[in-house]
Image: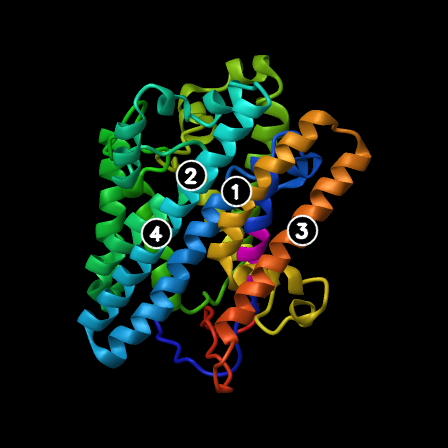
Amino acid sequence: MTLIRRGGTRDLRVDFFRGLALWWIFTDHTAGDVLGRVSLTNFAMCDATEIFVLLAGYGAGLAYGLTMDRQGYLYAAADAVKRAWTLYIAHIFLFVVYTAQVAYSAAALDRGYYLDEARLDVLGTQPYEAMLQALLLRFQPSLLNILPLYVVLLLMFAVAMPLLRWQNLLLGVSFALYVVTRATGLNFQGWTGPDWYFDPFAWQFLFMIGASLSYAPPRMPRVRWPFDVAALLVLLAGVLVIWVVDTHPPVLAAMPRWVIRFVITQDKTGMYPFRLLSILSLLWLVARTVPRHAAWLEKWAASPFVLMGQNSLPVFCFSIFFGFFARMALEFSVAWPMQIAVNLAGAISLVSVGALSAWYRAKGRAPRVRAAPLPVMASTDSD
C-alpha cells in the first residue's frame, strides 16, 4: 500500500455521494414517495446505508488518522470519542423530537398505527423504562437505528486506530470479527424486540475498509479490466435478483440453495456478503469513472448534494423529522401534484438545513487555507 500525502483541493466526490445517500435515505423512508423507486436499493443489492457507513469510515480514517500522525494516538482517539458523543446527543435529541412528533400525530389524527409502525407503542405501557432504554441505545424506534450504529463504529475505531499503520492487520482482524459475527449472530441485544437492526460487529468491516482506503490508499492495479468485469457482473447479478428472481417465485425455487444463501438472503442486519460485494463493486466503478477533478462536481446541479454531504448530521436528523410530515401528506394523496410538492419541499428543506449549518460553522471564522483533499487510489499506468 502506498501512503498518498494530502495536498490540493477537496475531493468533492465524497461530499456528493454522501449527499446523494442522504437524499435516498429521505425518499426510501417516506412511504408512498414515487422517487423511492429510483433509489439505489432498486438497482443494487445494497442501499444508501452502505454508502453512508463506507464514507463515514473514509472520513474517520482521514481526519483522525491525520491527527494521530501529527499529535499522537491519544489526541486522535479523544477526538473520535468526542465525535461519538456528539452523535449520541444528536440521536437522543432526534429520539425526543421524533417520538413527540409521532405520538402527537397518532393522538390528534386517531391513527394508532403510527405508533405501531414506528415501534413506539411500548411508550404507552412502559414510558419510564423506555426512556432509560433509549438512553442506553437498546430501544431504537424505526428509522432511528443509523446514528447508534455510527456511535458504536466510532468507538470501535477509536480502539483500533493504531492498526491503521498496519493496514493488513487491521483489515484481517476486522474481517475475522465479521466472519465470527456472520457465523454466530453476535450482536447487541435490543430491549423489546430483536437485536440491533444494524449489527455493529458486522458493519464495522465496511467502516474499516473505508478508513483504510483514506489513510493508506492502495495503488490501482496495472491491469484493471478484470476488476471492471467482475464489478459489473456483481451489479448485474443484483439487478437480476431484484427485477427477475424476486418477482418470479418459480425462478427462485429452481435456484441452488447455496446461491440463494449467498446472493438472495435479505440479511441487512449482518450485512450479508453479497451486500458487501455490491457496495465495493460500486466503489470500484466510481473510482474508475469519476475523476477527482470532474468538472460536473463543481456545477450548480451537483452543489445541493455536495452541500448536504458536507453537513450530513443536521441534514440527516431533519430528514427524519420532515420525512414523517411527507408521509402524512402522501397518505392524503399520492397524485403527481402532491408528489411534486412533497419532494420539492423536501429538497428545499434539506438543502436549506445544509446551507444554514455551513453558515453557522463559518460564522465568525477567519479565512482559512483551502481544505486538504481526501486522497484517492493512486494510479500507476493507464489501461
Q: CA distance from mark 1 to mark 4?
A: 16 Å
Instruction: Pick whichever, 270 or 114, lies toward us.
Output: 114
Viewer can see residue 190: no
The mark nearer the N terminus, 3 or 4, is 4
Viewer can see residue 245: yes
> Which disc, if any, is residue 347?
3
Instruction: Pick whichever, 295 or 52, lies toward us.
Output: 52
The mark nearer the N terminus, 1 or 3, is 1
> Which disc, if any, is residue 89?
4
Q: CA distance from mark 1 to mark 2?
A: 8 Å
Give the number of the mark in front: 3 or 4: 4
Asked if the residues shown at circle 1 and circle 2 are in contact, with their CB atoms under 8 angstroms apart, the answer is: yes
Q: CA distance from mark 2 to mark 4?
A: 13 Å
Give the x, y percent position of residue 333: 74, 27
Category of crowding for the residue at label 2, using alpha-carbon neighbours closer than 10 angstroms: few (below 14), some (14–19), many (at least 20): many
Give the x, y percent position of residue 70: 26, 81
The mark nearer the N terminus, 2 or 3, is 2
The quadrant where residue 165 appears? bottom left
The residue labelled by disc 1 is 320
Instruction: Pick whichever, 63 or 311, lies toward us.
Output: 311
Q: Please name the residue shown 53% across and 56% down the image.
A: 18
> Which disc, if any, is residue 144?
2
